[in-house]
Image (cartoon, rainbow, N blue to C red):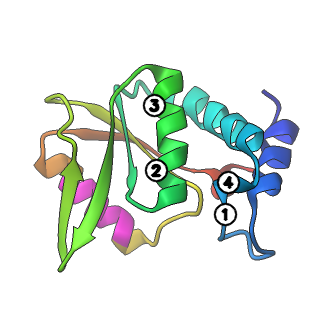
Amino acid sequence: MTDASFAAALAAIRFDDSGTEFETARSVTATETVGAGLAARARESGATAVASLVRADDAVLAHVVARELGVPRATIEEDLGLLTLSPRLPDGSRVAFVGLARLSERDLAAALTLLEGAGHTLTAPLFAASLQ
């Protein structure tokens, strides 16, 4: 996949001009292309699992990446200030954390703490908007 095809696919699911809002339902084909591009990067990092926030579009993208890699997928959810990872990933997973728009450093640090606390390693934070 070329950088140009990745950028074109990402543009097809962009919801606003700021580049921070995406809607995967706008194009299944574009979502698949973006997911395949992220999966290639996750494969290079040695990921054995994929995680995302529970947000619908991030979860759809994570599903595509996990399917491409043939690895399990989990979501991180916050409820009353408590972060949870569900479903449980295999012990010692090397996790690619994927999403459409980049997270704040605080939110990324919280996700990293959760993953490490569960015995996993973050191999790559992969945010589609940051890779175009």
Say which residue label 3 marks: 66
Marks 2/1 in contact by CB < 8 Å: the verdict is no
From where the camera sits, is residue 43 visible?
no
C-alpha distance separating marks 4 and 3: 18 Å
Q: Which amino acid does label 3 sit on?
A: Ala
Q: Main secondary structure of the magenta part?
A: helix
Frontmost residue, 21 versus 103 = 21
C-alpha distance separating marks 2 and 4: 12 Å
From where the camera sits, is residue 60 visible?
yes
Say which residue label 1 marks: 22
- The mark total stands at 4
Res. 59 mark: 2
Give the mark nearest the N terminus, 4 or 3.
4
Q: Where is residue 31 in the image (x, y as percent from the top left)?
A: 68, 43
Say which residue label 4 marks: 25
Q: Position of residue 15 (x, y in %)?
A: 74, 68
Give the mark nearest the N terminus, 2 or 4.
4
